[in-house]
Image (cartoon, rainbow, N blue to C red):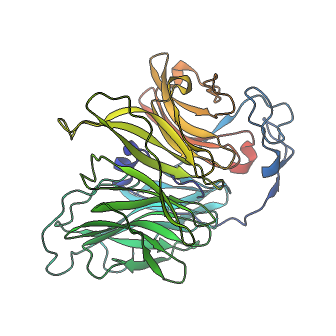
Amino acid sequence: MRTPALSLRRLATAASCAIALAACARSDVLTAPPSDCPAAVLSRASHSLAPGGSSLATNGCAHRAPVEIPLAQVIDLNDNGQVLGVRITGGSSELVIWSRSGIVPLLTPPGASGVTGVDLNNNGEAVGCGMFPPPPDPGPGTGPVPTSRHPTFATNAAPVCHVIRWNAQGVPTDLGLIDPTAHEAIALAINDAGVIVGTVITSTGQRAFVRSADGTVTFIPTPGTRSAAVALNEQGEVAGWYTNGSAQHGPWHAFTWTAAGGRVDVPALPSGFADAEASLMPVAINESGEVLGTLYAYHPATPTVLDRRSTFLYSRTAGIRGIGASSGFTNVVALNDQGEILGWSTLDGLLQPVSWATTRPSQLAVRFDWHAGEGAGTSYQINNWNEVLDSYVQGGVLHNVVWTWNPERYR
């Protein structure tokens, strides 16, 4: 996916299971058959983000309709309507990719005791983690490895994580530990060119890596003892973080990186925090190079307390800006190429999915035909059709849905 991003809640969920799916042919123009929410020809170039207005070519359809995804857990959504997730069969969980054309299981590589999935690109290729026995003599453990994109693993416990890439048919390739001195290697994102980013864990810390499709590995140099590359776009521009403190609690310094330009640090917002330091955790990057993330106040006196303050948006041309109370976000998870931000917010006493853009800073834009009876919701991903992957609980039943102007894409 172009703007992979997972919430902390999604990380914890991803630790239990994972999903992968067969590829659909990528297309810039899709023709939809008639439906109860009619859509004509949909083109990425026709997006309109005006609240209440048309999005794509909706023929008067005023809102996105929910389409139920028949999986036990959802993780990611790509531009072709494929969903990475987990299904339960025979009492056991299975990582799969779902689409209207069927389900593709993501196979477990030889020697692995299990797998989890993290990200899905537009070619139907996925990345994640395979659990393997630890390498010999791993050295002192570095403790848990939290990132904004992956479940926590203990480096000195069995099993350990290897980077796994699945092709569109669900066949896995074990890419191993990336670095021969590593205890673990954790993939966090994959783009359509097959470039994978993530972090490797060693006895002295952790390092952000970029692995090209040809197998060339670059470790991004940072001042910190711990770093991770958490997202990338189709041009290969990477967003990540580094710290000299705790990987789990910060303080984090955000950066972008390109092969040509190297690392550029994201400038810190004026903290305005008494006895605290601004701490920036990126979660997504889009094709314009905009980086979305969360601003925390890091308090040295209470370093294990995550004090979330607001959202930030950064680009090399426009610099950094805070997105504060006007957005209403409780948390943010994703950013698409049109600059639409996805997260969730507490409205009417319920946690609800919210999309918002800086082009309309005075509007909260809950655009899901959402009703209180549908219960609390969690946002996962927004794709470049402005379709949203979401879960909510109603009457004690979990519903995993895609909100779309064109339900026929999923039926």
169 up-or-down from 347: above or below: below
Left-right relation of 183 to 1: left
The residue closer to the viewer here, 130 or 46, is 46
For the point 69% across and 64% down, the residue is: 24
State the image coordinates of residue 364 (x, y, percent, origin top left).
60, 24
Q: Which residue lies furthest to the top in this view?
A: 348
State the image coordinates of residue 204 (x, y, percent, origin top left).
20, 69
State the image coordinates of residue 190 (x, y, percent, origin top left).
53, 65
Left-right relation of 240 to 388: left
375 up-or-down from 220: above or below: above
State the image coordinates of residue 378 (x, y, percent, origin top left).
47, 36
Q: In which quarter of the image is residue 137?
A: bottom left
Left-right relation of 284 to 306: right
Q: How many marks?
A: 0
The residue closer to the viewer here, 361 or 269, is 269
For the point 27% across and 49% down, the residue is: 248
Q: In which quarter of the image is residue 187?
A: bottom left
The residue closer to the viewer here, 321 or 31, is 321
16 up-or-down from 345: above or below: below
| Residue 411 visible somewhere in the drawing | no
